[in-house]
Amino acid sequence: MKLKELESHLQQVDSFKKPKILLEQYPTSPHIAACMLYTIQSTFDDIEGKLVADLGCGCGVLSIGAAMLDAGLCVGFDIDNDALDVFRSNAEGFEISNVDLVQCDLCSLEDGAYANKFDTVIMNPPFGTKHNQGIDMKFLSAASTMAKTVYSLHKTSTREHIQKKANDWGMKMEVIAELRYDLPASYKFHKKKTVDIQVDFIRFSKA
């Protein structure tokens, strides 16, 4: 599947009806999702036929895109049942069967609960606002136990901190691309229509 075709499909994925601020529910744009997934598959061959986990999957745009790129199975993990209901409806709308869902709190998973169960983890984790400081690292820590290869989005301003953590966990870190993440105004307190955040698209791998 070509990149433009993938993006056009992902534009039809429904997003959060009432996003929850405490869960930092911001949708991954179809453009960023398509670019991430297309790169993961075309450059690194880490989706087709693979067992893929999508952490903090929300309404499922990354999982559904991975399924379209012929993932063996994509398992979405999220704490919020409302988001997972939208995900289910999206998957049914596209008649996608190679996805599965797990409702859980990734920050309080038992150690090794899904140790090495997956080939690839993909995620757009919460960046960790004042309510959730450090949650991005908790997601990354969980991901590092689940698969040897992890693809994730993180604020560029946190790159040095993430590099230290990756070293601690014995993972090689490679910034694949620097992106401008366009956050649309989703909540009442947002004064601007959109805000651009500098974001790194990173590949972590274990030897």
Image: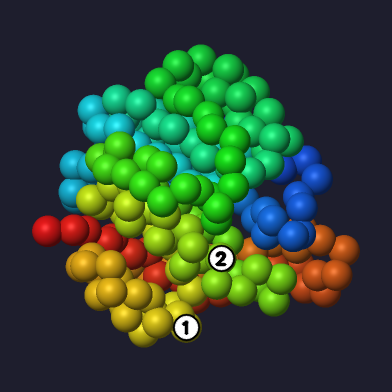
Q: CA distance from mark 1 to mark 2?
A: 15 Å
Q: Is residue 99 above or below residue 167?
A: above
Q: Disc 2 residue type?
A: Ile
The residue at the point 23 percent across, 28 percent down is 49
Estimate the x, y position of residue 40 in percent, counting from the top left: 28, 48
**Which residue type carries mark 1?**
Ser
Q: Is 113 displayed left or right of 27 in the figure? A: left
| Location of the C terminus (image quadrant) | bottom left
Indicate which disc residue 157 carries.
1
| Residue at x 74%, y 60% (from the top left corner) | 22
Mark 2 = which residue?
135
Q: Position of residue 90 (x, y in %)?
A: 60, 26
Task: Determine whether the residue tagged by mark 2 lies in a helix, strand or loop.
Answer: helix
Of 171 and 189, nearer the camera is 171
Q: Does 142 sit left or right of 116 as displayed? A: right
Q: Secondary structure at mark 1?
A: helix
182 vs 120, nearest the viewer? 120
Q: Residue at x 48, y 25 (%)?
A: 100
Quarter holding the N terminus?
A: top left
Q: Is 5 situated left or right of 12 in this image?
A: left
| Residue 125 seen in render | yes
Rendered residue at 65%/68% (across/down): 132
Which is in the foreground here, disc 1 or disc 2?
Answer: 2
Across and down, in percent, residue 24 comes to: 68, 59
Q: Would you identify the image quadrant in which residue 152 lies? A: bottom left
